[in-house]
Amino acid sequence: MDPQDRGPWEVSDGACYVALTYDVLDATSIMNRVRSPQAGAIVLFSGTTRDTFGDKPVKELQYSAYTPLALRTMLSISKSILERHGLKGVAMIHRLGTVPIGEESILIAVSSPHRQAAWRAGEEALEECKAKVEVWKREEFHGEEGTARLGSLLKSHRLLRRDQRPA
């Protein structure tokens, strides 16, 4: 990949901000994007790479995206969530490339006058992102081939290493 094509890619529209990046994610900066004097609550979701999936030991996660469409979908979700829950701000950032164990792959921050709306909106934003955003996850396991997943559709398939592919 050309280093010029490593982002970050960002889109802002009013109180909504979305981004894709290969860089380590920063929770403070994403929360600062939704701060408002009218907000009594900021809810932050931080999705991190865990060391197992089921009973398999995970080595790392690899994320790729169709960037223009993923940003458009993330912005659409953000605007919908903002309006539906009467929020003051929504910010989402998804990491691409390799995400080691314990590091964040996604941050979603929402701000609201009251905590109940912020809690609901944060969870709803995450579930919609997992279901709709054009970001693909490949789980790398210790000693095994990886498994690719498209959102929560869980359309998994076995990916063969080069030495396993038919000639």
Image (cartoon, helix red, strand yellow):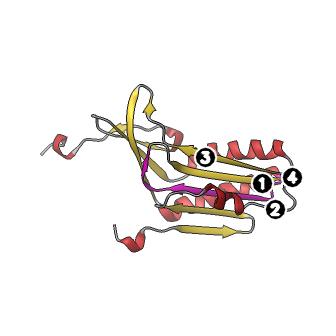
- The residues bearing labels 4 and 1 have C-alpha atoms spaced at a distance of 7 Å
Contact flag, marks 4 and 1 (Cβ < 8 Å): no
Q: Where are the magenta residues, as a range?
A: 86-100
- The residues bearing labels 3 and 1 have C-alpha atoms spaced at a distance of 15 Å
- The residues bearing labels 4 and 2 have C-alpha atoms spaced at a distance of 9 Å
> Which residue is the extreme one toward the left?
167
The amino acid beneath tag 3 is Ser
The amino acid beneath tag 2 is Ser
Contact flag, marks 2 and 1 (Cβ < 8 Å): yes
Q: Earlier in the sequence, mark 3 or mark 4?
A: 3
Residue tagged 2: 36
Image spot of residue 26 (x, y percent): 59, 58
Residue tagged 1: 111
Residue tagged 3: 46
Number of numbered discs present?
4
**Residue 126 occupies quadrant:** top right
Residue 87 is a magenta residue: yes
SS assignment at label 4: loop
User: Viewer-proximal residue, 140 or 147?
Assistant: 140
SS assignment at label 3: strand
The amino acid beneath tag 1 is Ser
Image spot of residue 158 (x, y percent): 32, 37
SS assignment at label 2: loop
Contact flag, marks 4 and 2 (Cβ < 8 Å): no
Contact flag, marks 3 and 1 (Cβ < 8 Å): no
- The residues bearing labels 3 and 2 have C-alpha atoms spaced at a distance of 20 Å
Residue tagged 4: 113
